[in-house]
Amino acid sequence: QKEVEQDPGPLSVPEGAIVSLNCTYSNSAFQYFMWYRQYSRKGPELLMYTYSSGNKEDGRFTAQVDKSSKYISLFIRDSQPSDSATYLCAMSVRPNFNKFYFGSGTKLNVKP
Amino acid sequence: SQTIHQWPATLVQPVGSPLSLECTVEGTSNPNLYWYRQAAGRGLQLLFYSVGIGQISSEVPQNLSASRPQDRQFILSSKKLLLSDSGFYLCAWSTGTASSGNTIYFGEGSWLTVV
């Protein structure tokens, strides 16, 4: 079993829709949770960073962590065609700050 | 602010030729440095990471090697490329401390095609 599972998609939605992207994980020691956006042929760009449980909002993006269910989500409101990209979740565990665990990415397509 | 530079962006190399990809980080000191490979439609595979000058940890036995000659410079090399070395290579850095927020930041990547 992989430490981090992520549905590869592709996920296709109309412009303006609310998008929900999710990852599950198996290691209850994960404490730091990240979401990255990766455009085609580019490096991943950090979108959201959350420590431990709870919600974090930044503009149209909301990151949620449910440690009891070992489940994290990224919500995108009012999705735009420019949001079309692959979204990667990532996690790390204290005290090994050197190692990061990544999902395989979900490809999102927002149709105009 | 911190920035990471990686080059070359794209290269096409014949089988058996050498490889050198270079990465530098600006705006921070003593970063943790990483090389990842990302195959098409697949996740990120950690190849090497370094916590300091001359300190390299290899995650996957392979045809590649890494070096860190300076604090903010990380180099990925090969003496003889194989077809299977083709892929998207990403350099990354992290602070390695909880106080700074434990996140990892990526360069723009290098597309390698071995022919």
Image (cartoon, grey):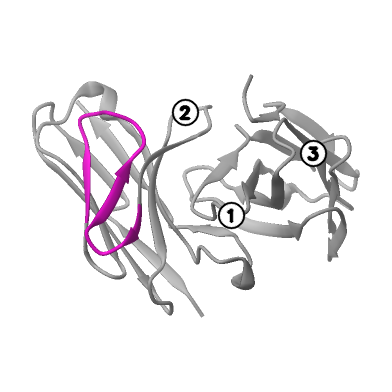
Q: Badge 1 sits on which subunit?
A: A
Residue type at the position of mark 2:
Ala
Amino acid type, label 3: Leu
Residue B14 left/right relative to A82:
left
Secondary structure beneath dot 1 equals: loop
In the picture of the structure, the residue carrying the numbered disc 3 is: A21
Residue found 68% across the figure and 58% down from its top: A47
Location of residue B55 in the rendering, given as x and y in whole percent from the top left corner: 27, 56
**Is B94 in front, or is A22?**
B94
Please tell me whether mark 2 sits on a helix, a strand or a loop: loop
Q: Mark 1 or mark 3, which has the lower sequence index?
A: 3
User: Amino acid type of disc 1?
Assistant: Pro
Give the magenta range.
B50-67
Q: Chain of mark 3?
A: A
Vertical comparison of B47 with A95: above or below:
above
- For label 1, the crowd category at 10 Å Cα-Cα, with few meaning under 14, some 14 to 19 and many 20 or more, is few
Badge 3 and badge 2 both on one subunit: no
Identify residue for label 2. B40
Q: Nearer the viewer, residue A64 or A19?
A: A64
From the viewer's perspective, is B112 left or right of A52? left
The residue shown at (71%, 59%) is: A49
Q: Quadrant of residue A87?
A: top right
Nearer to us: label 1 or label 3: 1
Quarter of the rendering containing residue B50: bottom left
Residue B6 in picture, x, y percent from top left: 33, 59
Q: Nearer the viewer, mark 1 or mark 2?
A: 1
Q: Chain of mark 2?
A: B
Q: Left or right of A42: which side holds B77? A: left
Residue A36, position as x, y percentages in the image: 64, 50
